[in-house]
Image (tube, rainbow, N blue to C red):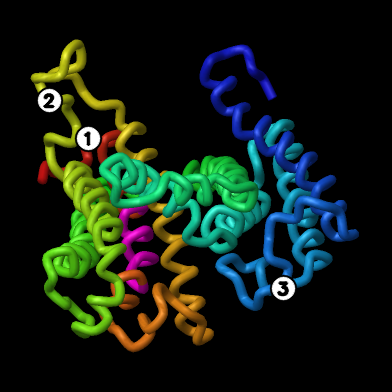
Amino acid sequence: MNTSSPRSIRAFVPVLIIVVWSVTYLVLGLLWAFGGPGYPFDAGRTGPGGTLLDPVPAAVGGSTLAGSALVAGVVAALAARGPLNRASAVAAVVAGAGLAVLLPDVRIMMTAGYLPVMLAAALVGQAEFSMIATMLTWPSVNLLILMAAGVCLMVLGARTLAGGPRQPGSAAGALRVGQWATVVAVAVPVVYAVTRFGWLLGLPVGISDRFLAHIAEITPIGAGLSLLGLFGAALTVGLVRPWGEIWPRWMPFLGGRPIPPRLPACSALALALPISSAGLMYVRKKLTGEQVGPVGAAEELGAWLPEMLWPLWGAALAVAALAYLHRRRHPDQARRP
């Protein structure tokens, strides 16, 4: 692969990351498959866990990771030699989605969302600082590494798949799809916030009075996460509005200048991944009859139903982000909202 230009250097970065990850996790996966230390999943010791690999033995989980690393390494080697063919691109996207969306659980979203909320709660005496340290463990860091590797694989595959023939007027259609996707991506966090802020105010939205009293101590944490969700929902609207294309004039140096199209799009996609993986974990647990949330939450509709909508939230956010990126790259084809 030619790396003489800045563009080609940027294109080579995902390949380099995948090569390093594939070599590392091929070795680690084989080590764990044969009983080596540091295996980051539960290996079936505590029953079905949050990730897809928690319920299976370490031999199966380690072999799965080693196999995924081998596939990723082959894709990276092909990408280093030149553009991927369509079959290799599809394999890269599927393998990447497995690592970045299907395999992880809620811990990545918890770390990104709860960490600042819990830090603020600890500073005002509403939580213990020791609770923060429990999020920064090797199993959680491992999931973040797997998600990063999956994203790089999807980027490699998407470059080939997105390079195919485009239909005339596709940007205008993407705008319409993006508007509907934005409605969904805003509605889901609003529904979640209505329940959590209601609980904080003492209103048993979707739950019983008894359960509200049971979770009274943790309602500020849920409300804090809801506040972050509402902030994200407000920014999501910018994906289909003109103000999402220009920096506000009050911003020093940037005011009035166009926002780089990739910045909002990539930010939204980065959030869509942990939102989707967290929601899929809740769906898996609910379908298998596992405990979802605090004890007694299974009988409380408001305690688990909003989380079931998170995969829809993540998918809608991703669609809205891609539509925004397509529209910004083809402004002559799109109609202004």
Tell me the SS state at disc 2. loop
Quick check: can you spot residue 86? Answer: no
State the residue position of label 2: 248
Residue 81 versus residue 56: which sits nearer the camera? 56
Q: Name the mark on residue 331.
A: 1
Q: CA distance from mark 2 to mark 1?
A: 20 Å
Q: Residue at x 62, y 76 (%)?
A: 48
Name the mark nearer the viewer: 3 or 1.
3
Tell me the SS state at disc 1. loop
Q: Residue 223 lies in what quarter of the image?
A: bottom left
Residue 158 versus residue 152: which sits nearer the camera? 152
The secondary structure that dominates the magenta segment is helix
> Where does the image place residue 56, in percent across and percent down from the top left?
73, 72
Mark 3 or mark 1: whose residue is earlier in sequence:
3
| Residue at the farthest front position | 125
Which segment is the magenta one? Answer: 308-318
State the residue position of label 3: 45
Quick check: can you spot residue 126? Answer: yes
- 213 vs 166, left or right, is left
Name the mark nearer the viewer: 2 or 1.
2
User: Is residue 313 in the magenta section?
Assistant: yes
Q: Residue 189 lies in what quarter of the image?
A: bottom left
Q: Name the mark on residue 159.
A: none
Q: Are marks 3 and 1 in contact (CB under 8 Å)?
A: no
- 70 vs 199, left or right, is right
Q: CA distance from mark 3 to mark 2?
A: 53 Å
Q: Residue at x 87, y 59 (%)?
A: 35
User: Is residue 144 in the magenta section?
Assistant: no
- 49 vs 220, left or right, is right
Q: Are marks 2 and 1 in contact (CB under 8 Å)?
A: no
Q: CA distance from mark 3 to mark 1?
A: 55 Å
